[in-house]
Image (tube, helix red, strand yellow):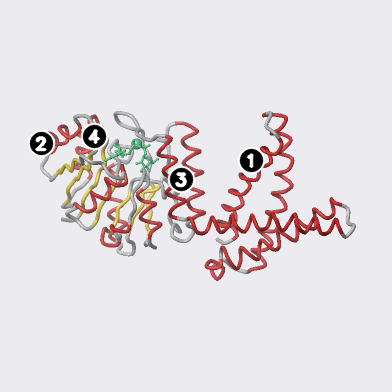
Amino acid sequence: MDLSVIVPTFNEGGNVAELVRRIGAALHDVDFEVVFVDDSTDDTPATIQAVAAATDFPVRLIHRDEPEGGLSGAVLDGFRNAQARWCLVMDGDLQHPPEDIPRMLDRAALGDVDIVVASRYVAGGTAGGLAGATRTAVSRTSTLLTKAMFPRKLHGCTDPMTGFFLVDRDTVDLDDLRPRGFKILLEILARRQMRIGEIPFAFATRFAGESKATFSQGMRFLTQLAMLRFGRMSAFALVGGVGAIANLVIMWGLIHLGMNYLTAAIIASEVTIIGNFLLLEYLVFADMRSESGQMWVRFLKSFAFNNVEAVVRIPIIPLLVQGAHIPSVLAAAITLAAAFVVRFVYHALWVYA
Ligand code: GDD
Ligand code: MN
């Protein structure tokens, strides 16, 4: 068998027949099966069985009575049960057009990749099916953050949050995956360095039924990120914390030597910015230095960013205090937290590119 199409489903009865029809119409000269990994609480399993009986290619149902790991766990069970080595994962609501599968197979057939990712964010792709500006903004922001946290492993992948991909199952260590939440692709890509190929695709709107995405899925995603990549970002936070303390100590010392407090604050900040840069060089991004060009270029980028950041951030505090009636210390903390995330993304993606 050439291909196993793995479809996780949770109460998708209205989509099954149309999905199977379109998969069958899209795949010619391919020996394939469709594997539904279903955690439904409604009559979706019966619908899948009825559709399976009426098709001339194998359609299998794995119904899980104890749905472990949600969507990600379902995909993992699909990998374990697949007949073929190459597995195509897609949603069951037709947001992932089956007509794109042949292009993914063609890309894999070039023989130089372990995984082909169908991306909304590469030239030619669109995320039109994302309902609303908020969802779009959340998707783009989390993609940027994720890429910053795994700059090397996700190199060449513009859409680590997509649920539409074709993977050589033998290149994935299934026992190593810790499925949680909705983002199984991220789990696969973050665990080991894969050779990634991409094709653009247009993310469609849902055919029938409702999305199962929730706020708690979002929280689960953030946990997944933190667990996968606790290392670099926590080290980055530590360096920032040490820098903040050093900044204050230097300022205090200079004032005691008789210096004016504003001059002392400026000197202390600049010394800290330089010190922080050295810590980033030799601790946090040490493994990326050899591939990130020249050190003085990185220094200029980092130095310019930190100075601009201070000039931009501080005037935002009175805006928050007066506009949103937030206490000044809380307002300062909010700007610092936001600045921390922006600074991390900037350094991971543009300074240590
Ligand atoms: N077996 C199983 N168990 N399937 C599930 C579960 C679960 O607990 N939760 C959701 N699914 C299935 C749905 O039935 C659907 O086929 C697919 O997973 C995607 O779920 P949607 O409800 O359509 O969520 P979405 O459209 O918000 O999120 C999807 O879109 C993202 C792109 O924005 C996810 O599939 C992501 O993987 C995808 O990248
Ligand atoms: Mn969907």
* Picture residue at 47% right of the left edge, 37% below the top: 136
The tag on residue 54 is 2
Q: In what element is the residue under mark 2?
A: loop
What amino acid type is highlighted by mark number 1? Ile
* Picture residue at 36% right of the left edge, 49% below the top: 118
Residue position for label 4? 40
**How far across and down, in percent of the image, does residue 119 sit?**
40, 48
What amino acid type is highlighted by mark number 2? Ala
Q: Earlier in the sequence, mark 4 or mark 3?
A: 4
For this rendering, which residue is in front, 260 or 141? 260
Q: In what element is the residue under mark 3?
A: helix
Disc 2 to disc 4, C-alpha distance: 21 Å
Q: Earlier in the sequence, mark 4 or mark 1?
A: 4
Q: Earlier in the sequence, mark 1 or mark 3?
A: 3
Residue position for label 1? 334
Quarter occupied by residue 48: top left
Quarter occupied by residue 206: top left
Specify whether tag 4 is near ligand 1 (CB below 8 Å): yes
What amino acid type is highlighted by mark number 4? Ser
